[in-house]
Amino acid sequence: MLDYLRLEVRRTLRDVGFVIGGVAMPVMMYLLFTNLGENDGSWKAQAMVGMAAYGAVGSALNTGGGVAEDRATGWLRQLRVTPMTSRQVVVGRALTGSVTVLPAIVAVLAAGGLLNGVRLDVWQWALVAVLLWLGSIPFTLLGLGNGYRLTAQTTGVTNMVCNLGLAVVGGLWFPVTLFPGWLRSLSVYTPTNRFAELGTSVTGGHAPAPGAILVLPVWLLVFGSYAVLSYRRSAGTI
Amino acid sequence: MTKTTGAPPAVSFAGAVKTYGEVRAVDGIDLRIARGETVALLGRNGAGKSTSIALLLGLVEADAGAVELFGASPEHSVRSGRVGAMLQEGRAVPRVTVRELVTFVAGRYPAPLPVARALELAGIAELAGRRVDRLSGGQTQRVRFAVALAGNPSLIVLDEPTAALDVEARHAFWDSMRAYARRGHTVLFSTHHLEEADAHADRILVIDRGRIVADGSGDLLKRSVGGNLVSFDLAGRGTRGLSLLPGVRSVEVRGDRARLRTDDSDATVVALAELGAVRGLEVAPASLDDAFLALTARIPEAV
């Protein structure tokens, strides 16, 4: 299983599309959004968390793209005729997702700390990184659900729509305070908004709202069920 | 059926059936493959080769009947590392080198080949550091062969392994396959190339419409449909009575030429001479093509 994880992580990191879209883009967007015009320090910290979250969501969804590709090339079918069990393959893939979200998180936090002068205590940096890491799990499951259900091409498009849609509505790119009221009330129910809130509560030095602790597990359950259903549906055809 | 050895056969099918909607892709197959045999599964496209292989590997389950590998369920035998397979239409795994891929697969098996040996057997030692998705079609195919044999499985299953290979790559591939079979492993490959089945297998199973219609060596198959082909110009005479001549098993007319399949070409020729039907007379051994066509004929041949 560890070998499988290592192999898949390596394959993901060799994907130029992943490195540009999943790591370089969030960093560039972060630097752009926080250095154009007048910005105060709190926005730099908040946007840092938002963009790290955006990068993590993209990377997590990308795991599903990998699954769709592996279905198309027959690699998953080939694994079925090795001694590996299906469970090992699925769990290995999910773990791959949880590893490949790290570069985006680390890169954006580093840009915040080193280039944008965001100052936090050591425990805050660590806690932000860990919460963003754990909070990305529902999005890995969403990606896997797409990857097991859809073709490689539609998975790519669907992941992108999910990523952009959830990022914008969830307030990862722009603060929700700029949104009209109806959108703002919608935003708090998105998984991305609550995901970022885990991080911003730490940088802001307060505990996350009870809502965040409630909404995110609901999405975890929804996306997890979606992933399981998709996997079951595809199991016969892999 | 009596067992002659204590060890269960490498492969056994007992009345295996697999239907897809209306289509009986595998329609009651019984067969046993002993350990160490090299067997070809020969059939047209859509004859049921790939479905048989999917059943054998436990990728699909039989609707009726039983399939066993080494006396256990296919799934169990695959999990215990006794089986390696090269599936049809597998494409290159993206963004991984040949060595990484083969090392990974070998590591899944309890007693794999050393990676260098697996690469050497597949004839791709010099490609070890190359990325799999940047190789030619023939090279990719041999990487897939290396993946199939990396775990040193007792049974290796190759589904149309030479489809889309050029002649040279095909030769290289069969050399590799024979080297693996010589190590005492059981090899089952499917093909629709008759010459390949004849040249590289100890035993040929002809499959048609989901059933095994013939089982034996290439020579045996040729004999089973009439050992020789006697042909001559009809020159206007009819074909009446030809099928009653000694030795003749079937009569076919192509243009103005009659083609008689016969078990006893000498007797057939003598009888034809008595009839004066000797213009352009030729005697040729039946080819495997003839055997195959006769065995899988959709419509009984007109006599």
Image (spheres, coloured by chain):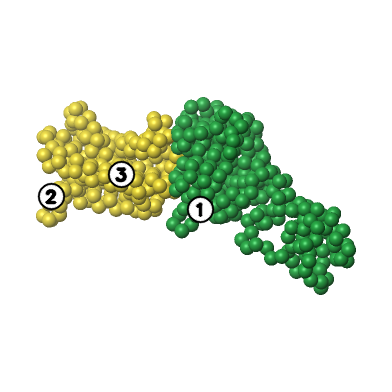
Chain colours: A yellow, B green
Kind of residue sitting beneath label 3: Val
Cα–Cα span, label 1 and label 3: 30 Å
Residue B292, given in percent of the width and then of the height, sits at 66, 53
Q: Residues within 10 Å of mark 2 (few under 14, many from 20)?
A: few
The residue carrying mark 1 is B25
Same-chain check, marks 1 and 2 = no
Callout 1 touching callout 3 (CB < 8 Å):
no
**Spatial CA span between label 3 and label 2:** 36 Å
- Which marked residue is nearer to the observer: mark 1 or mark 3? 1
Task: Name the residue tied to disc 2.
Answer: A177
Task: Tell which residue pokes out farthest to the bottom in this image.
Answer: B236
User: What chain does mark 2 sit on?
Assistant: A
> Element at badge 3?
helix
The residue that label 3 is drawn on is: A228
Numbered disc in front, either 3 or 2: 3
Residue B165 image offset from top left, x and y in percent: 61, 48
At label 1, which amino acid type do we have? Ala
Q: Secondary structure at mark 1?
A: strand
Residue toward you, B96 or A173: B96
- Identify the residue at horizontal 40%, vertical 47% (top origin): A236
Res A80 label: none
Q: Residue at x 41, y 34 (%)?
A: A4
Q: Residues within 10 Å of mark 1 (few under 14, many from 20)?
A: many
Question: Where in the figure is residue B72, as x and y percent of width and height?
Answer: 48, 34
Of residues B275 and A150, the one nearer the viewer is B275
* Chain hosting mark 3: A
Compared across the picture, whether B4 is left or right of B52 comes to right
- Of marks 3 and 2, which one's residue comes earlier in the chain? 2
